[in-house]
Amino acid sequence: MSMSGKQIFYFGDSLTDVGVIFGALVQSLEAQILPGLIAALGPDPTPEEIALAQQQALFLATQQAQAETQALGFGPENAVTNEFTHATYTGDVSGDTVLNFANAGARALGTQEPFGTGTGYDSNLGAQLTRFAALPDGAVEPNAKAVLFIGGNDFSDAIGDALDLPGGSVLDVIAAASGVITSLLDALEAAARDLASAGIATVYFGTLPAGSFFPGSDELDDFTSELSDLAVGLYNDLLAGRAQQLRDDGLDVEMIDYGALASAITEDPGGFGIIADRSEFLIDGAPFDSDQVGFWNPIHPAEAVHQAWGAYAAYVMDGGTTAALSDFGTLNFQTNGDNAVFANGGADTVVALAGDDVVFGGTGDDRVYAGSGHDIVSGGADDDYLRGDRGNDILGGGCGDDTVRGGSGNDVLIDGLGSDLVKGGGGDDVIIFVESTLEGGGGPSQDVFQGGSGNDTLYLVLDQLSFAAFEANGAGSVLTDLGIAASSIEEVVAIDGRGQVEETLNGYDWFQDGDYWGLIAAPSSAELLG
């Protein structure tokens, strides 16, 4: 991916906000605290005394804001997740400068004063755009981009209100969903036009995840959940149509299909490195490493999802397209562009061409043939066949008895749970094995790792006992104990637990992509399984 170094302005809700609503709360509290501190100084405070009072007010306001937001489920980075949101990770991958206007709890429609009526701070989309418009002249650089990823709270409000009506019926839910869809489309179109007029070169509409993506929706009855998902799906389709209309009018408006990626994660979370059940939440102390858990709380994703969203958005902004296959799909790329494919369920066959492609096979016995670009491929669950080509590919087998074959490039071949055949190719390949005790178990397996004609390296990510055995006795006995038959591999390196993966591998230029897409085990949390 290219490193563009452009600006990205984000507008949205808690799925995007990192510290924005927190900073606004600090300012609001500071304005309430400071007058009392100054009054306590007497009738003629000195400038030095006023300055000290201002410092104290800021300190007290920050403490109070931290207490209030943590009680509401905010994490250590003042976002409603355990680390950062997707916006930050997109900037990490793309090299762009992220300017975040999103507010946790925001709606696209209407106004809202989260700190109390009369406090003067509105968190909703219209106010976010007003604050953007108030930036000084020249603040928006040429070729700046903007992302509008908002509307989930509006859907929840409308459908929830319909269900709460006395005798509320299916017709009430349908009417509510229809009304909010029309209003959201109009609001986002108006926002896109305003942003373009303000100098934004490209506006991206973000599709919404289906309600069933969030574990909190599990409390709904099946019919209501399915109806809600249909409404969100219809909205996403119409939003893409509205983007096309704006392009016809001469505006550069594109789509980032966060919803498609969310559906792929729901269908096969293990393909993205998520092994915890969807009922396990990091905020409650889920007994997994941070990158193995999909959700921070019932309605907010954790870092694993945000990193995948971030990597995907950077991919789209760099020209990548998106396709989602139905069960038992077959896709032969007809262009040499960069294509992201979420194959989802069924036994799928995907044949890539020359672009730098991203393919997630999902569940089912999939066959994925990488093209001549630098491809990222996750086989996902079940027994998959993955084959590299001339590019420097990242190929992850996932769960199941997989065959992973490198091509002529310098490939990264990632073993998963199951008995796998992993074969290097003509380049200098890296094979990564993670002991099953660090990935939720899975029982013994019999893996065959064969290097190719290049200078190949096998990394073994081991638990404490196996690492100690490796240090004491060398690779041979440990490989045997783990059921690994290795040949034609020039170097074997042991890594002491998942917590040391990033330190060991982050010197490779492929590491960030493998980590953010969830193919490589690299938690950011200090709470590790060992």
Image: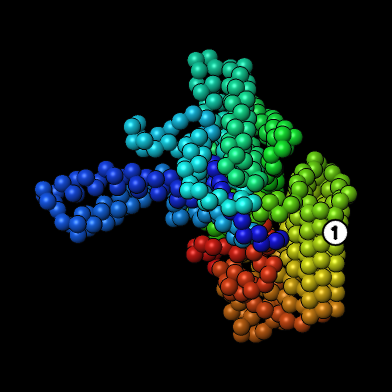
Q: Is residue 394 left or right of residue 505?
A: right
Is residue 270 visible to us here? no
Looking at the picture, does residue 202 appear above or below residue 485?
above
What x and y, as percent, mark residue 139?
52, 51
Q: Which residue occupies the foreground of this view, 392 or 503?
A: 392
Residue type pointed to by label 1? Ala
Q: Residue at x 62, y 71 (%)?
A: 506
Q: Residue at x 62, y 60 (%)?
A: 5
Q: Tell me which corner region of the image, top left, top right, bottom left or bottom right, holds residue 505.
A: bottom right
Q: Quadrant of the N terminus?
A: bottom right
In front of the other: 61 or 39 = 39
- The quadrant in which the C terminus is found is bottom right
Instruction: Examine the image and state in which quarter residue 446 appears.
Output: bottom right
Residue at 74% x, 71% y is 431
Q: How far from the left and from the top, in percent, is residue 363?
A: 76, 48
Name, please, the residue furthest toward the bottom. 473
Which residue is farthest left?
A: 43
Instruction: Report the side of 365 relative to 103 (left or right).
Output: right
Vertical relation: 475 (above or below) 46: below
> Please, what secondary structure does the residue beneath circle 1 have?
loop
Percent x, y of residue 240: 71, 36
- The answer to which quarter of the image holds residue 207 is top right
Task: Provide the residue designation for mark 1.
Answer: 354
